[in-house]
Amino acid sequence: MRNKFHTQQGLTLIEVLIALMIVSIAFTAIIVSTSQNIRNTQYLQNKMIANWVSLQIINQVRDEVLTIPESEPLTGESETLGQKWFWKASLTPTPNPKIQKIAVSVAQSEQGKRIINLTSYIYHEQQK
């Protein structure tokens, strides 16, 4: 007597569609994660370069290569790693007359959002 039931050979259409749906969801998650990683890497790179630019300005003021008037902020631009950076630096007196506060902010465009604000202090041997 022959067996009325024969075994199934392969997958049904519904099983294939469910498998494809699971794979597409997984691939979408991978693409979103990779895209976010790329954006974060670009942000951190820009933040690090802006930090270098601000440290360069502070060191130029400390070495008296760059002079900032106390009355108003000094603005400028510099090129670092093939990108143009716009900075603004200001000097502020502190309660100690021998110490001045220097604040530098850096952006990628003249009117753009500041990427970094860095503050430091400069000690002068002789009172001005």
Image (cartoon, grey):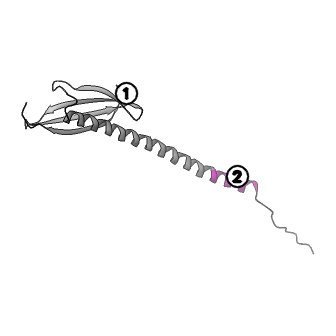
Q: Position of residue 83 (x, y in %)?
A: 41, 32
Which element type, helix, strand or loop, lies under badge 2? Answer: helix
Q: Kindly identify which residue carries mark 1.
A: 109
The furthest residue to the bottom? 1
Quadrant of the frame with the C terminus: top left
Q: Position of residue 37 (x, y in %)?
A: 47, 46
Q: Position of residue 69 (x, y in %)?
A: 17, 25
Horizontally, is 123 left or right of 57 in the view?
left
Which element type, helix, strand or loop, lies under badge 1? Answer: loop
The residue that appears at 39% across and 38% down in the rendered structure is 46
Residue interval drawn in magenta: 1-23
Horizontally, is 47 left or right of 102 in the view?
right
**Quarter-wise, where is residue 18 in the image?**
bottom right
Q: How many marks?
A: 2
The residue that appears at 63% across and 49% down in the rendered structure is 24
Q: Amino acid at mark 1?
A: Ser
The residue that appears at 67% across and 52% down in the rendered structure is 20
The residue that appears at 81% across and 63% down in the rendered structure is 9
Q: Amino acid at mark 2?
A: Leu
Horizontally, is 72 left or right of 128 in the view?
right
* Front residue of 74 and 18: 74
Quadrant of the frame with the N terminus: bottom right
Q: Kindly identify which residue carries mark 2.
A: 17
Horizontally, is 4 left or right of 30 in the view?
right
